[in-house]
Image: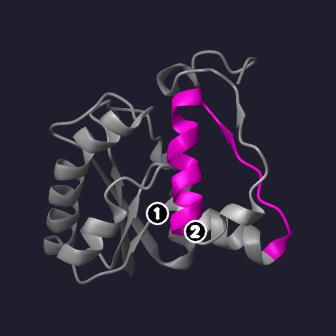
């Protein structure tokens, strides 16, 4: 069985429901997860991201030690993906990098909807870093904090 470890780079428990990924078990994939011991409650700006990176890397090291075959940083800002790749020998994936490249393969433009205006520069920088900025349309903002997403499903 392949072990994929989700590192959710926040200290808020319960934000990720593993029931969402349970169907992967049918394909021989075991999903494990950890949250941070130290870091932000959510990531909505560069400062939050900077707070998350040290313990995100620690969680990646622990996941590799505990037998993970791959790691997914469970945040669309991909915090700590690149430094974690320097520290562990197993693949470390970020959902934004993966999504941007998949979107670039499937279409001519990339559209992003995000939670807050403060996240827009972060996502634009990732678009530049991943080589797809010229294919991005203007980023749309729903102006709803991450920790509120599940509380107001109608608005989300």
- Say whether marks 1 and 2 touch (CB < 8 Å): yes
Label 1, secondary structure: give it. Answer: loop
Mark drawn on residue 86 = none
Quadrant location of the N terminus? bottom left
Q: Is residue 63 visible?
A: yes
Mark drawn on residue 94 = 1
Residue that appears at 77% across and 59% down:
110
Quadrant location of the C terminus? top right
Q: Is residue 108 magenta?
A: yes
Label 1, label 2: how far apart the Cα atoms are: 6 Å
Q: Nearer the viewer, residue 66 or 12?
A: 12
Q: Position of residue 79 (x, y in %)?
A: 36, 52
Highlighted magenta segment, given as a residue range:
106-130
Q: In screen coordinates, is 59 left or right of 7? A: left
Q: Nearer the viewer, residue 94 or 132?
A: 132
Task: Look at mark 2 in the image and give the residue it sits on.
Answer: 98
- In this picture, is 137 found above or below 43? below
Q: Position of residue 62 (x, y in %)?
A: 14, 64
């Amino acid at each position: 069985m392949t072990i994929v470890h989700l590192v959710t780079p926040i200290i808020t428990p319960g934000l990720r429901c593993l029931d969402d990924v349970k169907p992967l078990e049918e394909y021989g994939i075991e999903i494990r997860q950890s949250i941070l011991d130290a870091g932000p409650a959510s990531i909505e700006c560069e400062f939050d991201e900077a707070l998350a990176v040290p313990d995100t890397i620690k969680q990646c090291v622990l996941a590799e030690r505990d037998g993970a075959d791959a790691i997914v940083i469970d945040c669309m800002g991909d915090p700590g993906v690149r430094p974690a790749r320097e520290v562990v020998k197993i693949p470390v994936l970020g959902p934004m990098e993966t999504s941007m490249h998949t979107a670039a393969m499937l279409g001519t433009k990339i559209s992003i909807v995000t939670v807050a205006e403060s996240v827009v520069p972060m996502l634009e920088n990732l678009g530049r870093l991943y080589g797809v900025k010229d294919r991005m349309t203007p980023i749309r903002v729903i102006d709803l904090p991450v920790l509120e997403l599940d509380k107001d499903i109608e608005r989300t």
